[in-house]
Amino acid sequence: MFTGIIQAMGVLQQRSESQLAITATDAPFLKDVAIGDSIAVDGVCLTVETFDATGFTVSVSPETLQRTTLAAKAAAAAMVNLEPALRVGDKVGGHFVTGHVDGVGTVLAIVSTGTSWEFTFSAPAAVAPYIIPKGSIAIDGISLTIAHCNEKGDEFSVAIIPHTYAATTLQFLRVGEGVNLEADLLGKYTRKFLRLLDSSTPQDIDLAFLQAHGYA
């Protein structure tokens, strides 16, 4: 379990067909890392296999590479966001993030507003039903609040403050790039429970439905 509060950035590289290496010389949590620990790499929960003071290695399955942006980022030796797993007693500054990516979105627009930035993304069908105004979403592992979205939920915007911009890979994103998206865990459970409790629940739960049933 993670919170979406990024603690460091690193460089992702392909070591073999199924193994990735992350160089992170400025990651303070590496001093306490152990083999078998979970670390979210751009929002993907991965298991540490080897490590030293400069970084760590992980293995990835073909499914993980197909469902996320890791393959493309490793090929480009791109920067990635890093967060170690939540420990008992840690602050929960963001929201509960599992590290299981629901789909890959695309950067549609980036606008500087003087004191902040507004990013607009597309969301695939697997994520769109959970996109609501002021709801939570993890983008490349970053806990963010949805500022605006269209009715279908397949297009949404987030506002980024200077600290978040400087401390994460959002500063490197460009229009057209893909991002890992994880929908809010509570929203996914709510949707499933509603279907189980009411066979008349529509397949597509929109904002109007959630408001009518007291969820938004």
Image (spheres, grey):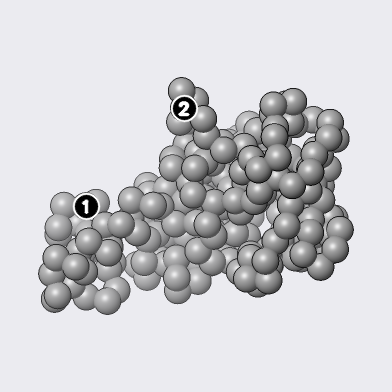
The crowding category of the residue bearing disc 2, from other C-alpha atoms within 10 Å (few below 14, some 14 to 19, many at least 20), is few
At horizontal 45% and vertical 74% (from top left) the residue drawn is 125
Distance from disc 2 to disc 1, alpha carbons, whole Å, reads: 29 Å
Residue 81 in the figure: left or right of residue 158:
right
Q: Pointer 1: what residue?
A: 215
- The label nearer to you, 2 versus 1, is 2
Hey, what amino acid is under mark 1? Tyr
Q: Position of residue 103 (x, y in %)?
A: 54, 66
Q: Position of residue 88 (x, y in %)?
A: 46, 27
Query: For numbered disc 2, what is the local secondary structure?
Result: loop
At horizontal 21% and vertical 69% (from top left) the residue drawn is 195
Q: Position of residue 87 (x, y in %)?
A: 51, 30
Q: Is residue 54 above or below residue 188?
A: above
Q: Pointer 2: what residue?
A: 88
Can see residue 145? Answer: no
Residue 50, image quadrant? top right
At horizontal 49% and vertical 42% (from top left) the residue drawn is 1
Hey, what amino acid is under mark 2? Val
Can see residue 19? Answer: yes
Nearer the N terminus, badge 2 or badge 1? 2
Q: Is residue 1 above or below residue 58?
A: above
Residue 107, image quadrant? bottom right
Residue 20 in the figure: left or right of residue 105:
right
